[in-house]
Amino acid sequence: MASTGTHAVMPKPYVVGTEQFDVADPGPEQVLIETEASAISAGTELAIYTGVHQWLADPSRTWPKFPFVPGYSAVGRIIAVGEAVDIFAPGQRVIYAGRHASHALVDLGAASPLIAPIADQVPASAAACAPLAQFPLAALVRSGQALGQSVAVLGLGMIGQLTLRLFAAAGAYPLIGMDPVAFRRERALAAPGVQALDPGAGDVLTLLRSLNDDALPDIVVDATGVPSAVNLAMSAVRDGGKVIMVGSPRGIAGDVDFYHNLHGRSISLIGAHGSSIGAEPREGFPFTRKRALRLIVHLLESGKLRVDDLISHHVHTSDIGRMYEGLLNRPEKFLGVTLHWR
């Protein structure tokens, strides 16, 4: 049943378009999926799109390299299965680590493949973001106790917005979103228990205390992707609190006073990347990829995690170039972006 599909491609920095490719039949342990929608991961994909990703120039790395087919978060429907597949069937709707492509082959024989069923009731724009939600979920898991903890999230792009909503679902309160862009602060306020502030509107510590019963937050999550933001994150948490670095800050943090801000105040600085959720449990980190996806799907299907209202643009893939430029240059208009393929 070989046919022709379409996928996005970046031949070089600041250029993105689409091209056709041959869609292969599934092998014995593979499923063939027709994509319904895919979500743009602004941090990773813009780093590659602009040519600043640190691995582009590393000869020891095979990923990412131009020409590059972006994307890793999608929803679609299985249209064919290999002869050895018995846990999925044609017609099933699934989320998976799909690139921006009309079709995808997922190898179920690989170690913990990223694929899970999801109900038809979940809007395509929300379901497409499910694999992307692993990053903020890692921040939630790495923070330890969330129930009743005050949490501030620095940076309200999609990762920051999802972080706020996952902490809200876990019972954290109060929640404070921090971003200089009013559009993003307004979207953050839609989550229960969330307040928002502009970090440039005054002394940040005073503003935080005014929203948190005269105390600094127990947990600060840095979702900016800007290395130097660690200074603000470390200064904004209470003594003995936790700073969670979610996503992928790229570059050198600069002048960080670890002696005072880290040691002197006894805070914990914790890394939380989506890749920390792997195929097998890690000591002190019980989540596996399969377990994480199962939880994210439950939260979406039950309505405990709402995502569709964070999607500012749900467009046909033919509009992909404008989407990258918008995410890069117009944060006051662009937040979540999903591409539909039908």
Image (cartoon, helix red, strand yellow):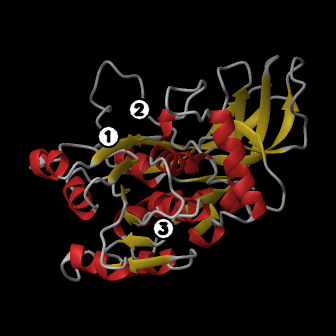
| 188 is higher (above) or lower (below) than 268 | below
Of callouts 2 and 3, the N-terminal one: 2
Q: Is residue 162 left or right of residue 180?
A: right
- Give the residue type at disc 1: His
- Give the residue type at disc 3: Leu
Return the x and y of residue 106 as percentages of the image width and height. Answer: 71, 30
Q: Tell me whether the residue at label 2 lies in contact with that at label 3, contact meaning CB atoms closer than 8 angstroms.
A: no
Disc 1 versus disc 2: distance between alpha carbons?
8 Å
Return the x and y of residue 48 as percentages of the image width and height. Answer: 37, 43
Of callouts 1 and 3, the N-terminal one: 1
Q: Residues within 10 Å of mark 3 (few under 14, many from 20)?
A: many
Q: Quadrant of the C terminus?
A: bottom right
Return the x and y of residue 35 as percentages of the image width and height. Answer: 73, 47
Residue where numbered disc 3 is placed: 335
Label annotation for residue 101: none
Report the front residue among 225 and 264.
264
Instruction: Select label 2 or label 3 by which is in front.
Output: 3
| 106 is higher (above) or lower (below) than 336 | above
Report the front residue among 213 and 42.
213
Return the x and y of residue 317 as percentages of the image width and height. Answer: 61, 56
Residue where numbered disc 1 is placed: 53
Residue at 46%, 36% (x, y): give it: 68
Disc 1 versus disc 3: distance between alpha carbons?
21 Å
| 143 is higher (above) or lower (below) than 78 | below
Residue where numbered disc 2 is placed: 64
Circle 2 — which element? loop
